[in-house]
Amino acid sequence: MDVFIYIYTFKFMFIFNLEHTEIQFGGIHVGYSPSGLRVSQFARRSMRLKEVIFAGTTDMTLRNYYKFLQKLQISLLAKKYCIFTHNCRHISLRLLQELKCDEGTGSLKLKRLS
C-alpha cells in the first residue's frame, strides 16, 4: 500500500507560521499534537494543507499497523509533547520507519524539517 506525508501550515500564537505533519496509510491519518496521538479517517480541516508527499509503499497490513498504533498511543501521552524535541515530525519519522517505506523521497524531506 502507498504511504503519504501530509504537511499542513498553521499560525502559532497568531504570529509564527509552523508546519504540522501527518502520515496517511490505508485511508488513516495519524498525527501527534499537544492533545496526543490523533488517528482519523479525515485530513485536518483546521489547518491549511501545504503539500502531500509520496513516502513509498509498505507490505504492512492495516491490522498490524493498528496494533503498532495502540502500543504507540500508550507511550505518546499529550504531556510528553514538546514543540521542539518531541513533536509531530518525530512521530511521523517513527511511523515511516515502522512502515519500512524508504523508497520515496518523503523520509529525506521530513528529516530535513525535523
Image (cartoon, grey):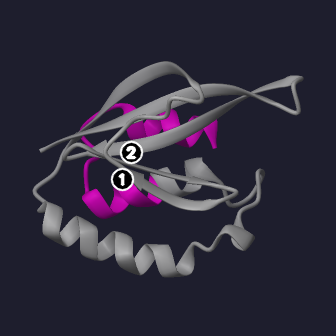
Decide which of 3, 100 is in the foreground and name it.
Answer: 3
| Residue 103 in magenta stretch | yes
Q: What residue type is labelled 1?
A: Leu
Please provide percent x and percent y for residue 107.
41, 41
Query: Which label number is shown at residue 72?
Result: none
The front one of 16 and 100 is: 16
Residue displayed at 39% across by 58% down: 95
Query: In the rendered structure, does residue 101 fall within the stretch colored magenta?
Result: yes
Q: In the rendered view, does 15 fall on the left or right side of 70? A: right
Q: Which residue in the structure is indicated by mark 1?
A: 96
Ranked by sequence position, the earlier of labels 1 and 2 is 2
Q: Where is residue 81 in the image (x, y as percent from the top left)?
A: 71, 63
Q: Quadrant of the N terminus?
A: top left
Residue 23: numbered disc: 2
Residue at position x 46%, y 20% from top? 51
- Write the start and end of the magenta stretch as one range: 93-114
When the figure is inspected, residue 12 is found, relative to residue 37, above or below; the finding is: above
Question: How far apart are the alpha carbons under marks 1 and 2?
Answer: 8 Å
Callout 2, which amino acid?
A: Ile
Q: Main secondary structure of the magenta part?
A: helix
Count of marks, rendered view:
2
Q: If the image is split into quadrants, where does the C terminus sit?
A: top right
Is 108 placed left or right of 85 in the picture? left
Residue 91 location (% of width, % of height)? 52, 57
Residue depicted at x 26% and y 57%? 100
Q: Which of marks 1 and 2 is in front?
A: 2
1 and 2 marks in contact (CB < 8 Å): yes
Category of crowding for the residue at label 2, using alpha-carbon neighbours closer than 10 angstroms: few (below 14), some (14–19), many (at least 20): many
For mark 1, does the 10 Å Cα neighbourhood hold few (<14), some (14 to 19), or many (20 or more) residues? Answer: many
Q: Position of residue 93 (x, y in %)?
A: 47, 52
